[in-house]
Amino acid sequence: MVKIKRKSMISVILPLTLGMVIFAGGCGKKENHEIVVEEKPARTEYLLAEAEKGDVVLSKKVTLKYAQKDSENLSFKLEGYQIKGVYVEKGDRVKKGDLLAELDMEEAGEEYENCISTIELYETSLKFLMEQKELALDQSRRMVKNGEIDEAGAKERDKKIEEEYEPQIKEYRDLIEYESLRRDYYGGQVEEGRIYAGIDGTVAFVRSFSTTARSLKTQNVVTIFDSAKCSFTCAGEEYAKYMHDGMKCTIELLNGTLYDTVYRFSPEEKELVFDLEEPDYSLSIGTKAYYYIIMDERKDVLRVPKKAVHHAGDDYYVYYTDENNIRTVQYVEVGLEGNDYTEIISGINEGDFLVLK
C-alpha cells in the first residue's frame, strides 16, 4: 500500500473525492494498491477595497409631496353667448386683473355706451339749469340791494323761482338715476361676459372653441396656477440649517424623473419648500419625490468604503492581508463617516487594499 499526501488541491490533477479509497488491479496481478489522498484547506479569498482620494458625503434622504397651494378654474357667468375671444395660451404668465377671455356682448356694450352718453348729456343740462336757478336767486339779492323790492318781495320771488325750476331739476335727476341703473345693468352684463385673472400665476389650461361655440356657465374656460406655489414640500424644520433660501436643488420622482427647483423655508408652516422652476401641470397633488440634504461633506480626502471600517468603543480599525494572506488588524483615525465612505485621517495610505468582505 502506497500513501500520498498533497499540499494543494488535486481536483484538477485527479478527479477523486476527498477520502476515497481506490483499489486498482494491475495487469492481471492479484495484489492491490491502496491510495489515500489528503487535501490541505484551500486558501481563503477576500473581497478587497482600495483606499483612494475622493469626496465623503453625509446626507439625509427626505420625502417630498407635491402641492398646488393656489389655483382657480374660470368660467363665463353668462350662458348662450358667442365667444368673442380667448386671449391667453397655456404657459402664459398673467397678473391679477388681466383680461383672459370675453363673450360677444356687442348689444349690451352699445347700450352701455349709450347710457354713458345720455347720462353725460343729462348731467350737463342739469348743471346748466342749476346755474340758471342760481342766477335768478342772485337777481333777487341785487334787487333788494338796489331798493327795487323789499325782503318780503325777495322771498316771494325766490319761492316762485324754486317752484319754476324744481320740477325740471327733479326730472333731470330722475332721468340720470334711471340711465345710471341701465348703465350698471348693461355694464354688468359686459363684465359678466369677461373673464379676468383672479391671481398672479401661470395659465395651465385653455379651452379651445369653434367659431359657432356658445358659452356655458358650467364650462371651465381657463385654469390658472399660482406657479410660485406649485411646490414639493416636507416637514423638517431640523434640516433647515443645512439649506439656504435660493438654493438650486434637483429632486427625483419615484419613476426617476428629475425636476429643477429653488429651495426656500416656510417659517409659518415649518416646511421645506422646493418651488418648481418650470411648472408641470401633469403632476398630481400628493406626488412623491426625494431629495438628499447634504449635512456634511469632505472634498478630495483619503476614503475607504464604509463597510471596510469597524469600531469597538472609541477605537476604529480595518483589516488587511499580509504576504501569507493572513487577515491582520490595523487601527485608524477616522474623520467624517458618510453614507457610503468613511474619511481616513491616519493609519493607512492611498493605494492600500483593505478587506471589505
Image (cartoon, helix red, strand yellow):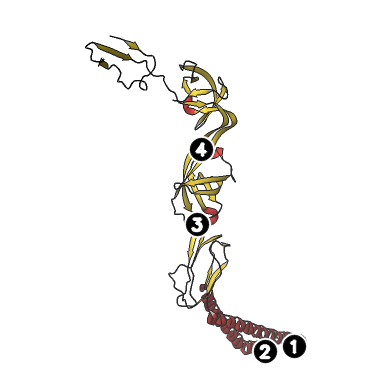
Q: Of the residues shown, which amino acid type is indicated by label 4?
A: Glu
Give me the C-alpha separation between circle 3 and circle 1.
72 Å
* Of the pair 47 and 167, the residue shown nearer to us: 47
- Whether residues under marks 3 and 2 lie with C-beta atoms below 8 angstroms apart, the answer is no
Find residue 244 and report its horizontal and vertical position in percent: 58, 42
- Secondary structure at badge 2 equals helix
Q: From the viewer's perspective, is the residue at label 3 or at label 2 nearer?
A: 3
* Residue on which disc 4 sits: 238
Q: Give the vertical position of 170 relative to 343 (above or below).
A: below
First-in-chain label (3 vs 1): 3
Dot 2: within a 10 Å radius of its alpha carbon, few (fewer than 14), some, or many (20 or more) residues? Answer: some
Report if residue 333 is visible in the image: yes
**Helix, strand or loop at disc 4?**
helix
Q: Is residue 218 left or right of residue 152?
A: left
Sequence order check: which comes first, mark 3 or mark 2?
3
> Which is more N-terminal, label 4 or label 2?
2
Mark 1 vs 2, N-terminal side: 1
Mark closer to the chain start, 4 or 1: 1
**Where residue 143 is drawn, which disc sits there?**
1
In front of the other: label 2 or label 4? 4
User: Is residue 171 or residue 59 the one in the foreground?
Assistant: 59
Say if residue 179 shows up in the picture. no
Residue 84: x and y in percent read 53, 76
Name the residue at the left extreme: 30
Mark drawn on residue 336: none
User: In the rendering, at what x and y percent does residue 294 appear?
Assistant: 54, 37
Which residue is the site of mark 2? 157
Disc 1 + disc 2, Cβ < 8 Å = yes
Q: Quadrant of residue 250?
A: top right
Q: Please state which amino acid type lies under the numbered disc 2.
A: Arg
Mark 3 / mark 4, whichever is N-terminal: 3
Q: Which mark is on residue 70? A: 3
